[in-house]
Amino acid sequence: MEVAALTAFLSPFLPALMRAGESAVEAAATRVGGEALEHAKSLWARLRPKVEGRPAAAEAASKVADSPDDPRWRTALELQLEELLAEDSGLAREVASLWEQAHAAGVIAAGQRSVAAGGDVSGTINTGDNVNIDR
């Protein structure tokens, strides 16, 4: 399992998941998609106790919740998650299983220039360089 992709997937949900207010979670579901949120909730429910038990990981998660697009804090959280999963093989297996379920549901795009979309998609999605689209 690629921890960088896991961190990128969780980051937009952390503001709602860390604050655990129902209205915040509902807002995230509206913004990002309900099915993706359900997978994020499952993953975070499994990771959260270990993250909270490690001060550096808890700080990184809190900072990502405050600024989900800040690559520095996302990298810090990624490193912390990497260490947690390396230390606990049972947790790593459980998270990998949940991650695979999210992949199977089609809510995760992994890899360079990947796109995941839930529901109806219309229009053009371009992830390439120097692409001309004629309409």
Image (cartoon, rainbow, N blue to C red):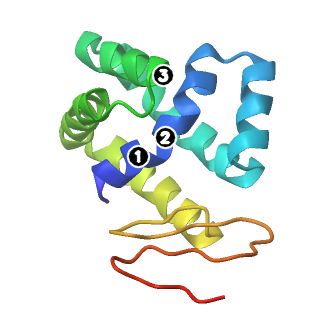
Cα–Cα span, label 3 and label 2: 10 Å
Q: Is residue 92 left or right of residue 69?
A: left
Nearer the observer, 69 or 36: 69
Cα–Cα span, label 2 and label 1: 6 Å
Compared to residue 29, the image places residue 125 above or below, namely below
Q: Position of residue 71 (x, y in %)?
A: 29, 35
Can you see residue 114?
A: yes
**Mark 2: few/some/many CA within 10 Å (<14, 14-19, 20+):** many
Q: Is residue 72 left or right of residue 30?
A: left
* Amino acid type for the residue under numbered disc 1: Ala
Residue ranking furthest to the bottom = 134
Q: Which residue is mark 1?
A: 8
* Nearest to N terminus: mark 3 or mark 1: 1
Q: Which residue is mark 3?
A: 65
Which quadrant of the view contains residue 41? top right
Q: Secondary structure at mark 3?
A: helix
Q: Secondary structure at mark 2?
A: helix
* Nearest to N terminus: mark 3 or mark 2: 2
* Amino acid type for the residue under numbered disc 3: Ala
Seen at 37% across and 24% down, the residue is: 50
Q: Is residue 77 left or right of residue 35?
A: left
Cα–Cα span, label 3 and label 1: 12 Å
* Amino acid type for the residue under numbered disc 2: Leu
Q: Secondary structure at mark 1?
A: helix
Quarter that holds the C terminus: bottom right
- Mark number displayed over residue 10: 2
Seen at 41% across and 25% down, the residue is: 64
Task: Evaluate if marks 2 and 1 touch, with contact meaning CB atoms under 8 Å apart.
Answer: yes
Q: Is residue 133 left or right of residue 80?
A: right
Quarter that holds the N terminus: bottom left
